[in-house]
Image (cartoon, coloured by chain):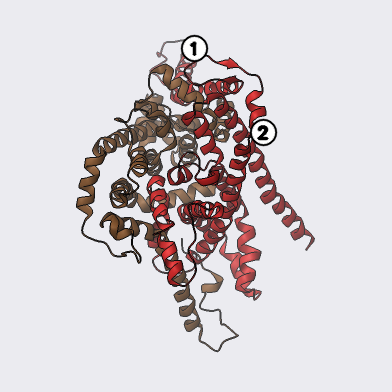
Chain colours: A brown, B red
């Protein structure tokens, strides 16, 4: 985790200045912190700004110089928001889509990954190469025909049009397979086979508990993506009474551009659940993300 | 392969045991195929079939309701002579360049700083990742107000320090800079964390050897860090390319389906969306999808050759030296 580094080594004496190594070290660390904090400020500021606008009147925002501290009108803006659009309905729709997608993805991806990682069967390599090749296909290519299929199925405007196509994906299978190869000892599988466990029992009793850290990462990742998805819901949810939060938010922005503080209150409500989910799993999530990237 | 007594009764002949084992094997194969089948079934319905159908569609004229009319290559020839199609390609590439290059450069510097021995490393990592998990729609709305022409925060800052204001959301470059700023903000920390993981995998002996040789900070960065990170840099360049070519939500929310004044924010995917789902030109939308696919393949290949090609050259130079 902590990497010894040439520039941060106390043994390294700066010859050009007459400062002691400790002083040089302290100055370097101070400058690093200042630069990193500027970066943090840039990363966090838009959220702060969103909160400022959501807690003031639109008049406060549209003045020179603008108000830069939060006000006390957050609840009033949220009340206006509730009167303008069905925010609870769209939040519920989003929650249904995100939870169903996450559960299905975790199940289908992990059981397929387990089969690919720990078993031999005819055609396995060819099937896995096909799976990897599907990464290369941009989803936009199939957008128009997918919409036509949904229309044929009578699913346009329904939530299953979002859930079913996203119920299993190559990314998750690939990620979990890489993880399962190291995390599930073959001896354990042999032992359970002697005990008479079939494939599905082995999956449930042996694989799922051992895959838990990777499943946590994939679960948070899938949930956040499903919550934020915009392109496909915008296309397929044509019924204005049944839309997701992201689509509702963009419609709100289109309709009420003059009432900025209310729109910001909507953005605020759309972002909060995500931040909560992220902060709960942040540490695990970030280390797994990094490990995943290294493998690629 | 161990034989379990369950399947083969004690009195059975060896042939029967082999037979039972083969039966069990077949049953296991069936379970395995069942386990991997959901992906292939869904991919066939929502992947293979749409792709074949989109080839068919791109040779037709169809508004989604009426009769389909076969038009041969007419959609493609129209596309090649459609100035807005070319403009959307140019816009996409311009935004990609002014977002990806600064973004990856900043990310590399951030990662290099985070790799020092400093306090609060995990707090920094969480803070830098937050922009990436937020709703793009919300981000586009917030940036719309920050870059607003009259009362935007950036214009207020520019005025305060004595510079003139910029019409961000109505001028060609203003629009592109505003979109690029969103992309940079959203993906800077993500890429920094990817680079950080790569930096932590570089063996410490290399740095120690460099220190013994008296290498400077800059030499270490360009002679050890960058070459060792090359595969990770390739990964970030490819993912940024794929993401950049598919840019949609930021311009759509900020500027609408036509990409704002003079189509200056019209990207390739936004154009596909506008043609197919706003103007009901399904055949033309499918043709644009294929153009997008070809452009992405060619461009990813060029990127790959650039990054990996310079690696092999670097290795050769290393051997000679």
What percent of the width, then of the height, locates residue A57? 26, 56
Q: Considering only vertical position in the picture, is B20 above or below B151?
A: above
Tag 1 or tag 2, which sits nearer the N-term?
A: 1
Label 2: element kind = loop
**Front residue of this view, candidates A136 and A87:** A87
**Front residue of this view, candidates A141 and B44:** A141
**Front residue of this view, candidates B204 and B301:** B301
Q: Is residue A157 visible?
A: yes
**Front residue of this view, candidates B126 and B317:** B126
* Crowd rating for badge 2 (residues with CA inside 10 Å; few <14, some 14–19, many 20+): few
In the visual, does B224 lie left or right of A293? right
Q: Is residue A36 visible?
A: no
| Mark 2 and mark 1 on one chain | yes
Q: Residue furthest right?
A: B320
Q: Considering only vertical position in the picture, is A68 above or below B216?
A: above
Q: Chain of mark 2?
A: B
Q: Which residue is mark 1?
A: B19
Residue B81's disc number? 2
């Amino acid at each position: 985790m902590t990497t010894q580094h040439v520039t941060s080594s106390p043994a390294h004496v700066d010859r050009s200045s007459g400062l002691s190594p400790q002083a040089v070290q302290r100055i370097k660390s101070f400058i690093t912190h200042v630069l990193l904090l500027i970066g943090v400020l840039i990363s966090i500021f838009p959220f702060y700004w969103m909160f400022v606008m959501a807690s003031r009147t639109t008049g406060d925002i549209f003045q020179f110089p603008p108000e830069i501290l939060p006000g006390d009108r957050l609840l009033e803006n949220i009340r206006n928001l509730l009167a303008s659009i069905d925010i609870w309905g769209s939040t519920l729709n989003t929650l249904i889509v995100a939870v169903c997608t996450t559960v299905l993805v975790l199940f289908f991806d992990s059981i397929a990954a387990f089969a690919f990682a720990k078993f031999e069967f005819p055609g396995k390599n060819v099937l896995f190469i096909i799976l990897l090749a599907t990464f290369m296909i941009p989803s936009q290519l199939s957008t128009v025909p997918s919409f036509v299929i949904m229309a044929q199925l009578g699913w346009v405007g329904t939530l299953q049009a979002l859930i079913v196509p996203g119920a299993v994906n190559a990314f998750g299978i690939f990620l979990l397979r890489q993880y399962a190869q190291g995390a599930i000892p073959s001896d354990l599988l042999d032992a359970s086979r002697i005990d008479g466990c079939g494939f599905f029992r082995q999956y449930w009793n042996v694989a799922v508990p051992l895959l838990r850290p990777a499943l946590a990462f994939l679960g948070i990742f899938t949930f956040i993506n499903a919550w934020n998805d915009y392109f496909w819901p915008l296309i397929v949810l044509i019924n204005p009474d049944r839309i997701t939060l992201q689509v509702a938010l963009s419609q709100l922005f289109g309709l009420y551009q003059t009432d900025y503080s209310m729109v910001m209150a909507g953005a605020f409500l759309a972002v909060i659940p995500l931040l909560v989910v992220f902060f709960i799993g942040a540490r695990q999530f970030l280390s797994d993300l990094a490990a995943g990237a290294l493998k690629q | 392969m161990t034989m379990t007594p369950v399947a083969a009764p004690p009195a059975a002949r060896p042939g029967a045991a082999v037979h039972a084992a083969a039966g069990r094997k077949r049953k296991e194969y069936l379970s395995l195929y069942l386990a991997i089948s959901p992906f292939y079934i869904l991919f066939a319905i929502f992947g293979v079939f749409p792709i074949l159908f989109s080839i068919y569609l791109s040779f037709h004229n169809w508004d989604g309701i009426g009769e389909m009319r076969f038009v041969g290559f007419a959609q493609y020839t129209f596309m090649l002579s459609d100035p807005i199609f070319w403009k959307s390609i140019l816009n996409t590439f311009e935004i990609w360049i002014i977002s990806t290059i600064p973004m990856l450069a900043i990310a590399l510097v951030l990662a290099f700083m985070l790799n020092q021995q400093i306090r609060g490393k995990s707090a920094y990592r969480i803070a830098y990742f937050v922009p990436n998990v937020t709703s793009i729609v919300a981000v586009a709305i917030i940036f719309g107000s920050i870059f607003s022409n009259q009362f935007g925060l950036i214009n207020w800052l520019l005025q305060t320090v004595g510079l003139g204001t910029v019409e961000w959301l109505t001028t060609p470059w203003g629009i592109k800079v505003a979109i690029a700023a969103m992309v940079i903000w959203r993906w800077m920390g993500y890429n920094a964390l990817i680079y950080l993981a790569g930096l932590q995998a570089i063996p410490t002996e290399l740095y120690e050897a460099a220190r013994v040789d008296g290498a400077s900070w800059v030499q270490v960065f360009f002679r050890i860090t960058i070459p060792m990170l090359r595969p990770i840099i390739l990964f970030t360049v490819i993912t940024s390319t794929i993401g950049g070519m598919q840019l949609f939500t930021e311009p759509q929310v900020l500027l609408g389906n036509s990409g704002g004044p003079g189509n200056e924010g019209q990207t390739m995917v936004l154009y596909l969306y506008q043609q197919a789902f706003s103007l009901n030109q399904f055949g033309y939308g499918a043709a644009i999808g294929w153009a997008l696919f070809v452009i992405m393949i060619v461009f990813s290949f060029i990127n790959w050759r650039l990054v990996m090609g310079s690696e092999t050259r670097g290795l050769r130079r290393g051997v000679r030296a």
